[in-house]
Image: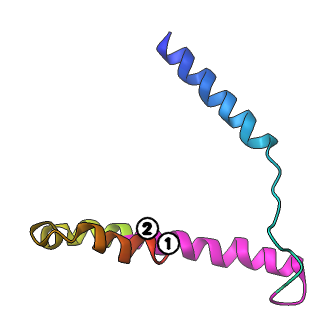
Amino acid sequence: MKHFCFKLKAGGLAILMTMVPSVPADDSHTVSGDRATDRVVDVLAVRPMGLATTAIGAVLTVVALPFTLPSGSVKDSARMMVVNPA
């Protein structure tokens, strides 16, 4: 029964997420002069680099834990290496 409820909630959430339209905040300004080119560059270059930067920051935060735990600066370290680059 628990498994069924989880699947029902997950399915409902998936359906709800597909019903929400994507609306850009302000689509009147472009970088290259062509909106299609901007979207392609965003999908193929900018977003993967952002994801990679976040993943590298997360790994570095874990590696730095032995040094940041004793000093109590784990939150500052995580903010600098994961939150700020994203």
Quadrant of the image occupied by residue 45: bottom right
Label 2: how many Cα within 10 Å (few below 14, some 14–19, many 20+): some
Which label was assigned to residue 55? Answer: 2
Q: Find out whether residue 35 is within the magenta segment.
A: yes
What amino acid is labelled 1 in the image?
Ala
Quick check: marks 2 and 1 in contact, CB under 8 Å? yes
Residue span colored magenta: 31-57
User: How is the rendered protein coloured?
Assistant: rainbow
Q: Secondary structure at mark 1?
A: helix
Residue 65 locus on image (x, y percent)? 19, 67
Residue 78 locus on image (x, y percent)? 33, 69
Q: Nearer the viewer, residue 37 or 67?
A: 67
What amino acid is labelled 2 in the image?
Ala
Q: Find out whether residue 1 is within the magenta segment.
A: no
Question: Label 1: which residue?
Answer: 52
Q: For marks 2 and 1, give the CA distance.
A: 5 Å
Q: Nearer the viewer, residue 75 or 31?
A: 75
Residue at 68 percent across and 28 percent down: it is 12
